[in-house]
Image (cartoon, helix red, strand yellow):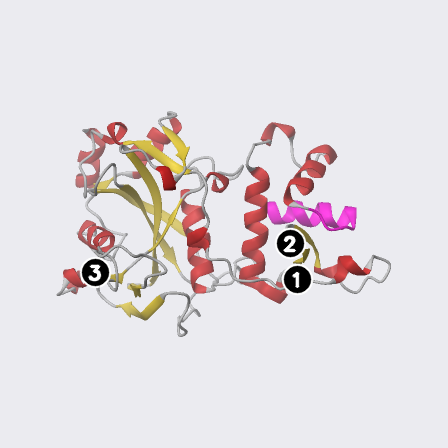
Amino acid sequence: MDAYLEIARTVLRSERRPLTPRAILTIAYKSGIVSHQLHGKTQHKTLGARLSEDLVQRNDRSMFFRPEPGKFFLREFLTDTSLPEEYRHPVPTRRRFRDLVMGAALAVDDDALARFARDKPIDPRAILDLLQSDKCRYEDPRHRSGNSVFFRAFVCVQRGPQVLTYRLGRYREDRDAFMHKRCIGFATLVHDFEHTLFNQGDFGIVDSGVHATKVDLDIPDVAEENAEAGKGGSLSHFIWVSEQGGGDLLAVICYECPTWFEPTKRRLALNDIRWLDDPSSINDMDDFDPWSQRVLLSAVEGPLCRGRRRAEADEAYSR
């Protein structure tokens, strides 16, 4: 189970009353469930996001429910008549449009990336070293400065050699260069609450991408229940995409979906979903959106995300 969800379950079971994420963590710190050394300003946001994602993905199978907006309680107490009735009435859980979640997102100045070539694979070690050297910041993407480069997790969903593709709708992307184009990844900004106590190494880049992808595709989080449910995501490489201003830094992540998963329904603005059998045999690259084109061209050897030329990445890292 997700560590944040375990903290919430422990506190709510002890308190026997609905609580906000901030209240849950406050009690957890006072009770010694979480060390004070691990305290962070945005941990309540992370907990709230984890609880909301669990409700979206599991619905009635989640151990949690909302008795009122902003508060969470345990489903095991629904039939406990010793508790007040208002504690035991779930409010409907609506799918949240995760692309509309705004807030501070991970960014870096373009001059910090000056030694890297644009539109070319960058070894993950170079960017992760940059993150650890305090060169990054969190900035509101609605008010980006001209030299800001925002990190975007770009998750390629794979099933063996196949890669999942879909066409972009206006909900997801309204830029002319992207509209109605085929896409091979699920992109999301990396917000401040995704940098948790448990992913310090990459500032939550991989977790943010995998969580967003699972929400988009309704892939239930059942990894603990079934060893074959999915292998999580792995960071392949970065690509600094050329656009006006600073552009965006794509973190290309490979996610091996559960073997039983088959996307057969129309979901949000994901249109014309289909599996691409061999990314190396694409005839019409212009059919793909600009970001997908960069990712496809970066897979110069073997299956997508798994065989990029190490020499090219090492060359970028050494510049």
Where is residue 310? Give x, y as percent.
21, 42
* Label 1: element kind: loop
Residue shown at the point (20%, 33%) measured from the top left: 116
Q: Position of residue 97 (x, y in %)?
A: 46, 57
Residue hosting label 1: 91
Separation of disc 1 and disc 3 at Cα? 41 Å
- The residue under the point 68% across, 34% down is 29
Earlier in the chain: of badge 2 and badge 3, it is: 2
Pointers 2 and 1 in contact (C-beta within 8 Å) = yes
Q: Which residues are magenta?
A: 1-19
Q: Which amino acid, by three-letter code, is at mark 1?
A: Val
Does the magenta-highlighted stretch encompass residue 94? no
Q: Nearer the viewer, residue 292 or 258?
A: 292
Give the farthest residue toward the left: 283
The residue that disc 2 covers is 69
- Residue at image mark 3: 288
Reply above or below: 294 against 196.
Answer: below
